[in-house]
Amino acid sequence: MKTALITGASSGIGKDLAKIHASKGGDLIIVARSGDELRQLQSDLESAYQINVHVIVKDLTALNATQEIYDEVKAAGIPIDYLINNAGFGGIGKFYKRDWEIDQQMILLNIMALTHLCRLFIPDFVKRNEGKILNVSSTASLMPGPMQAIYFATKAYVTSLSNAIAQELSKTNITVTNLMPGATATGFGKVSGMDKTSLFDQTATSEEVAQTGYDAMINGDIDVKAGLCFSQKAMLAAIPLAPKKLLLKMIEKMQQPRE
């Protein structure tokens, strides 16, 4: 069975992706900063599914973290079949008022860590001519995000990068899938402050989003949206047609935290 490496696996979508893969008999390498949560997940999955789970406790905002993960995987002699880049975070506030150190960490995690892990593992996939990548982006990647300028921009990068790499690898047996969830009921909403905005009035479950993403990865789909209600689908469909100034005002209003 295939081995999947999943970042941000201690909670939310990443944790549910780990459960889905384990339920299919697949081994796992789970990565996050939260060692206690990872080890509990390891224990739960190994006992429930008789699989092997390798834990790597790592802060992906650290500059050498991705190389250290790759080196540890290689030293352990574990071939990776699925690379799932799920770790990421956001935060609300005007660009010029937000704490730069936090936003720099956001860029390091959402962009740099994901990009470097792809760059490290894809050559191994190419040598074997097989492998699957699932990059967790967001529907935020489809529009600018006043009040979350950097987060939306990082996700636009993830979508663009994923699509470009998918085309470069289109003549191989390697696929790159870009998962774009809408508002999802995870810890992300609380950490980012999005749970206090109208965008989070209707949320999907992390289980639903994870299953949609996992299935799309297995199918080799390039893009997949997940967890959207009818009104959210209608809004996304209208984005290319809306005047830019009107669109920006609407998004800014939707991201104003309630008192």
Image (spheres, grey):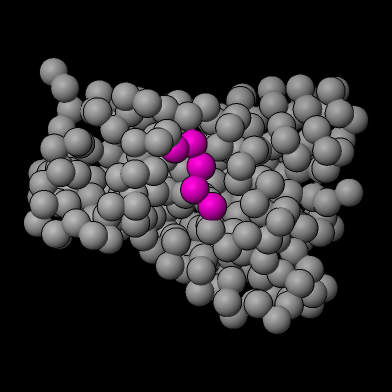
Q: Is residue 109 visible?
A: no
Residue 9 in percent (x, y) is at 60, 37
Residue 129 location (% of width, % of height):
79, 74
Residue 156 as seen in the image, left or right of residue 76: left
- Hey, which quadrant is residue 214 in on the image? top right
Main secondary structure along the magenta-highlighted residues: strand
Q: Is residue 118 above or below residue 96?
A: below
Q: Residue at x 14, y 59 (%)?
A: 243
Q: Residue 26: x percent and y percent?
A: 83, 43
Q: Is residue 32 left or right of residue 247?
A: right
Q: Residue furthest top?
A: 259
Q: Nearer the viewer, residue 164 or 113?
A: 164
User: Which residue is rendered at x = 74% and y = 64% of the image?
Assistant: 131
| Range covered by the magenta-colored residues | 224-228
At x 67%, y 66%, the residue is 175
The correct choice, above or below, for 209 with respect to 217 in the image is above
Say whether residue 84 is magenta.
Answer: no
Q: In the rendered image of this protein, does residue 223 appear above or below residue 249?
A: below
Q: Is residue 149 left or right of residue 22?
A: left
Q: Is residue 227 magenta?
A: yes
> x, y (%) of residue 63?
46, 58
